[in-house]
Amino acid sequence: MAARFFCTVNYWLFKSEPDVFSFADLKARPGGTEPWSGVRNFQARNYMRDNMKVGDLALFYHSSCPDPGVAGVMRIASEPYPDPTQFKPSDEYFDPKATEEKPIWILVDVAWEKDLKHHVGLDRLRGEPALEDMFILRKGNRLSITPVTAAEYKAIVKLSQTAAG
């Protein structure tokens, strides 16, 4: 009997301010792919470095805007690698402690996966009982990347099927 291998997909939520980089910007990139650069939080870095794998799915969340919420779905499109912005003195994400030999900051490439039928705003997320333990909804959470359970991911995709009412 042949061995069976199961591919487990992890789920994530990535936050970005839409006036800096939006879901529409990602979709418009060549191949719908972009390096997720500029992350300067160790926990978010560790998620990318230690836990993400190619094919994982991620919710793209617009933050710090008039209507924050989930705008679409993307997938992890590369293995983690050093964020080149940490080495460039002219870049806003330059880190003088980072070297090519010992990079500090890591990124992954993300790729547009699909549009949602409807934006799922923060109020709808907060009002959904299945999401009450979601990282993004916890008081004081400031991480730009957080894990999402399969149940949370499915609940959000289901919410996106209907317009806010």
Image (cartoon, rainbow, N blue to C red):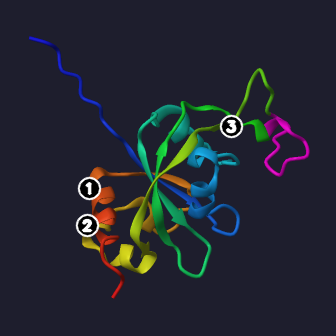
Q: Amino acid at mark 2?
A: Ala
Mark 1 against mark 3, which lies toward the viewer? 1
Q: Which mark is residue 130?
A: 2
Mark 3 Cα-neighbour bin, 10 Å: few <14, some 14–19, many ≥20: many
Residue in the foreground of this view, choosing between 33 and 130: 33
Q: Which mark is residue 151?
A: 1
Visible residue check, residue 46 = yes
Mark 2 Cα-neighbour bin, 10 Å: few <14, some 14–19, many ≥20: some
Residue drawn where x is 26% and y is 72% of the image: 129
Q: Quadrant of residue 81?
A: top right
Q: Quadrant of residue 97?
A: top right
Mark 3 and mark 2 in contact? Answer it, CB < 8 Å. no
Mark 1 Cα-neighbour bin, 10 Å: few <14, some 14–19, many ≥20: few
Mark 1 and mark 2 in contact? Answer it, CB < 8 Å. yes
Residue drawn where x is 28% and y is 64% of the image: 155
Q: What number of labels is visible?
A: 3
> Looking at the picture, does residue 40 appear above or below residue 157?
above
Q: CA distance from mark 3 to mark 2?
A: 33 Å
Q: Amino acid at mark 3?
A: Trp
Tell me if residue 90 is in the magenta stretch: yes
Residue drawn where x is 28% and y is 66% of the image: 158
> Looking at the picture, does residue 17 appear above or below residue 79?
below
Assign the C terminus to one quadrant of the image: bottom left
> Reading the chain from its start, which is encountered first: label 3 or label 2?
3
Q: Which mark is residue 105?
A: 3
The reply, left or right, for residue 17 in relation to residue 152 is right
- Please report the bounds of the magenta region as a residue range: 86-97
Residue in the foreground of this view, choosing between 79 and 103: 79
Circle 3 — which element? Answer: loop
